[in-house]
Image (spheres, rainbow, N blue to C red):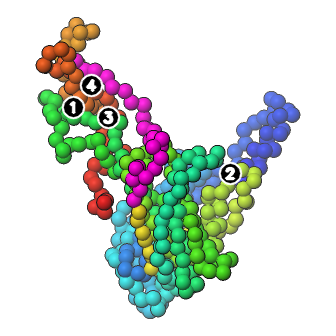
Amino acid sequence: MWIKGRYIIIYSIITWFIPGCTKPYNPKVISTASNYLVVEGTINTGGDSTTILLSRTVPLNSNLTTVPELGAVITIQSNQNQSYSLAEKGNGIYSSPVLTLPATAQYRLSIVTDDGKTYLSDYVTPKASPPIDSIGFTEVSNKQQGSGLQIYVNTHDPNNNTHYYHWDYLETWQFHAKYESDYVSNGTAILFRTPAQQIFQCWGNSISTDIELGSSAKLTQDVIYQSPLTFIPSTSEKLETRYSIMVKQYALSADAYNYLSLLKQNTEELGSIFDAQPSQLTGNIHCTTDATLPVIGYISAGSVQQKRIYINSSQLPNNWIATYPYNCELDTAWFADPHARGANNVEAFLIPLPTSNIPTVQFFGTGPAPLGYLYTDIDCADCSVRGTTTQPSFWQ
């Protein structure tokens, strides 16, 4: 990526002086085929399950963002001859039951891929994470990010033994459709929508994608204060009604921290000539079948701490208004359209199934009988297009 960026600068200078003498250049790195194994996850030794994500790298010019690795066999192995299997859950995810592993042992990951190749990580000593002290938030406004909410984490180790931290998180938020629908078609008629058929209020979720790290190695005390986790714009639907974030905290060795720091630099901090140059990554996972095959990933082990908070819209500025992701309008469907020779728009547009038209409310004239329905398309009335109507079990 750095070579490509440097070429663009040279190319721009040349074309400024010599117009009409340019031709496209496609660096070999763009189209080079790669199919390297990527291993993500931590061996959880402290009363929780271990989840490992396997995927394959893709060329820079590929339309794919990730290729999950299916059909692998993964086990956790200890240097005390214990073994624990992980089950395949689909989409490259492998998970174990809840495990409580002896902290006195060392652990590694064994992976046998569907093509018969074997990968082993180095044995690592478990590191126990101290508890998360708190998760907080502050309102910010600047030119770079705009206005929004900065989520941060606080932690410390009174024994002064941790120094290197890694966090990931799961976000969940309550949101609603642009318009509420009181009615639904059953294919032959329009009926009142029952509570079980409500599609106005939903919950969405997402997992962290950036690498969030913190270090107190250069401090006199092992304290992490307001380490930033994620920024949420003030116009985000995440803040529309109620937002929750569940943060997991991992203690790292110095080697694991350095690896993740380089990975963060290579994946998140490139793109301009002023960014750091990419560095070679050397993880602790190796292909024992073919030592020449690169493997991307670093396996750590230890107990994990987690904490969840909730943020209500009432805690935020009144002028923070969520921007709906679609352009939405209401239209009218008449039983007898006065503008189309009495055509029955309800029967034509709203009753037949399947349909993307959702009736919202009835409209009336001067008499007691309804004249028709207001309606909109599915993206504007059905929140389940982007989330789930089932409230999460943990939701408070």
Q: Earlier in the sequence, mark 1 or mark 2?
A: 2
Q: Residues within 10 Å of mark 3 (few under 14, many from 20)?
A: many
Q: Which residue is mark 2?
A: 271
Q: Report whether residue 299 is seen.
A: no
Q: Position of residue 192 (x, y in %)?
A: 15, 35
Q: Quadrant of residue 93?
A: bottom left
Q: CA distance from mark 2 to mark 4?
A: 48 Å
**What secondary structure is the stretch in magenta mostly built from?**
loop
C-alpha distance separating marks 3 and 4: 10 Å
Comparing labels 3 and 2, the label whose residue is closer to the camera: 3
**Pointer 1 residue:** 353
Residue located beneath label 4 in the image:
374
Residue at (52%, 73%) from the top-left corner? 155
At label 2, the amino acid type is Gly
Going by the numbered disc 3, the residue's amino acid type is: Tyr
Separation (CA) of disc 3 from disc 2: 40 Å
Q: Earlier in the sequence, mark 3 or mark 2?
A: 3
Task: Give the SS element for disc 2.
Answer: loop
What kind of element bears circle 3? loop
Amino acid type indicated by mark 4: Leu
Above or below 181: residue 62: below
- Which quarter of the rendering shows the C terminus? bottom left
How packed is label 1: few (under 14 Cα within 10 Å), some, or many (20 or more)? few
Magenta stretch encompasses residue 329:
yes
Q: Secondary structure at mark 4?
A: strand
The residue carrying pointer 2 sits among few (fewer than 14), some (14 to 19) or many (20 or more) residues within 10 Å by Cα, namely some
> Where does the image place residue 49, in percent across and percent down from the top left?
37, 74
- Left or right? Give the position of 7 relative to 87: right
Which badge, 2 or 4, comes first in the chain's sequence? 2
Q: Residue at x 65, y 50 (%)?
A: 30
Residue tagged by mark 3? 179
Magenta stretch bounds: 310-334
